[in-house]
Amino acid sequence: MTDFIQDIKDILFKKEYAYIELLRKDLAEEMNNCVEYEKKIKELETAISRQMGMISDSKQEIERLEAELDKLNENPLEEKLNSKYTKKPVKYTCRYINGKAYDLDVRNFFVNPNIDELKRIVKDFTGTDEDKAYDCFKWIRSNIKYEYDSQTYGVNEHWDYPHEVLELGKADCEGQSILLANLMIACGIPYYKVRLVCGWATRTDGTKAGHCYLVMYIESKDRWVALDTTFYPKTTRPENREDYKKSKIYGGEDSIWWSFSSRYCFQE
């Protein structure tokens, strides 16, 4: 009887041992699989890192090529006008929504020149750049009323996009200047001849006020002139206006804070 029991024990032990051996083999196989997985993961991580490096290099190359393309596309006058002053982005607190102030890149106020609202206004403006600019200037003077931001929005400073000025039919200095700049570009005047200037303007009594106004480059006279629809809205044609920096209204030391076109901001 004792031998029989022992035989049973031996059989059971062998079965348990075989089962344990099977589990050990399965575990060893799983461990090997884990090692393989880890190797594959490391290989993938290396490949991804290498690919990211290639993407970064490609991005830099694209930026370099774009910069070269911009240079090739620039004409001498464009390069001359864009290279005189230091370029530095300007963010300005100029929008308030539900009482919250927003700092925006001022170039955002130049919109797509092909939108219908703008094209509809300038469709009959033809001739030289000065002719078209003067037509745009007169249209603003005839169709857009002046109103302080405090009256329209209840805040001291709120810049309007062109479509907002058109919808309201009124704006203060920067709103009218922004719309004027967009109209001028919409009728084909090169962007580099059109800038908005923010700075001091001198009143007739000698006091100064913060102001935004448009300036245009007159190629035949090699000078920038102001097309100001609000502060001192002269009726003189653009080519017959004086260099704005030499004027008593806009000139003077530290009178300009910064200026900007649709592409660049300038520290003058």
Image (cartoon, helix red, strand yellow):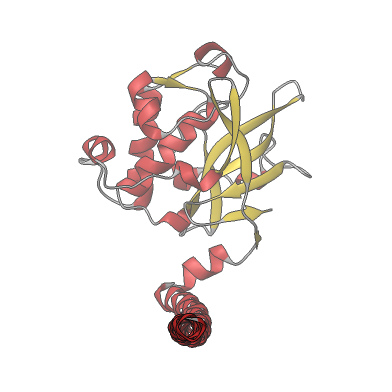
Between 160 and 128, the residue placed more toward the observer is 160
Relative height, residue 54 to residue 251 (above, below)? below
Q: Position of residue 208 (x, y in %)?
A: 74, 27
Between 19 and 56, the residue placed more toward the observer is 19
Q: Which image quadrant for residue 213?
A: top right
What residue lies at 77% left-to-right and 25% top-to-bottom? 206
Q: Is residue 85 left or right of residue 126?
A: right
Q: Position of residue 192 (x, y in %)?
A: 47, 58
Between 167 and 137, the residue placed more toward the observer is 167
What residue lies at 47% left-to-right and 52% top-to-bottom? 262
Query: Residue placed farthest to the front in the image?
Result: 1
What residue lies at 44% left-to-right and 73% top-to-bottom? 70
Q: Position of residue 193 (x, y in %)?
A: 46, 55
Q: Position of residue 98 (x, y in %)?
A: 53, 20
Relative height, residue 46 to residue 78 (above, below)? below
Judge whether residue 56 can be spotted in this image: yes
Q: Is residue 242 left or right of residue 40?
A: right
Between 181 and 33, the residue placed more toward the observer is 33
**Numbered label tally:** 0
Judge whether residue 234 can be spotted in this image: no
